[in-house]
Image: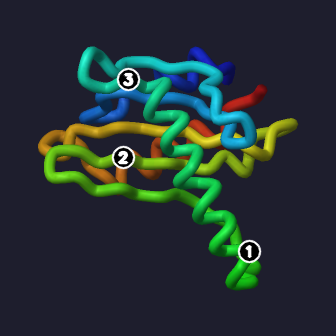
């Protein structure tokens, strides 16, 4: 699947508010969908790049021989899910950033869908 299809699939997840595919080497998003006036996905993509970089630095410092599957940030009304895209061919520095409405979303199902999207995405 291509980027546009992947973003559409992510927005079809129950409770999805916005999604971005982000390159954490550059901090730039390769595509976004959703968001709105109160959720600037470009700013969120850049900010969450720092979250991913920071966690990778900590893992390196601790000598952890492991990889990040996803990072969850829980707010009172939202889930912010960062899924590192280790399975994407030709690019090792991508993540999907998905914002979910907590009242509607099923977190386990959202994680399952993002994992499937990761497996199908080709860049």
Sort mark 3 into few (<14), some (14-19) or many (20+) by Cα contacts within 10 Å: few
Left or right placement of residue 82 versus residue 120 in this view? left
Percent across and percent down for residue 64 are: 71, 81
Task: Give the residue at mark 2.
Answer: 80
Q: Which of 40 and 14 is in front in this view?
A: 40
The residue that appears at 68% across and 20% down in the rendered structure is: 2
Pointers 2 and 3 in contact (C-beta within 8 Å) = no
Q: Nearer the viewer, residue 108 or 72?
A: 72
Q: Dot 1 lies on which element? A: helix
Query: 98 above or below 41?
Result: below
Task: Give the residue at mark 1.
Answer: 60
Left or right placement of residue 64 versus residue 73 in this view? right
Q: Dot 2 lies on which element? A: strand
Tell me how far mark 1 sits from mark 2, CA to CA.
Answer: 24 Å
Q: Nearer the viewer, mark 2 or mark 3?
A: 3
The residue that appears at 74% across and 74% down in the rendered structure is: 60
Numbered mark located on residue 105 in the image: none
Percent across and percent down for residue 61 are: 71, 79
């Amino acid at each position: 699947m291509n980027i546009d299809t992947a973003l559409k699939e992510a927005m079809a997840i129950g409770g999805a508010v916005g999604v971005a595919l982000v390159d954490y080497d550059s901090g730039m998003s390769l595509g976004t969908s959703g968001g709105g006036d109160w959720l600037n996905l470009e700013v969120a993509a850049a900010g969450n790049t720092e979250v991913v970089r920071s966690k990778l630095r900590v893992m390196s410092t601790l000598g952890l021989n492991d990889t990040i599957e996803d990072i969850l940030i829980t707010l009172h009304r939202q889930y912010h899910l960062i899924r590192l895209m280790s399975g994407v061919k030709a690019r090792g520095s991508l993540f999907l950033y998905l914002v979910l409405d907590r009242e509607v979303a099923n977190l386990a199902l959202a994680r399952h869908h993002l994992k499937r999207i990761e497996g199908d995405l080709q860049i």
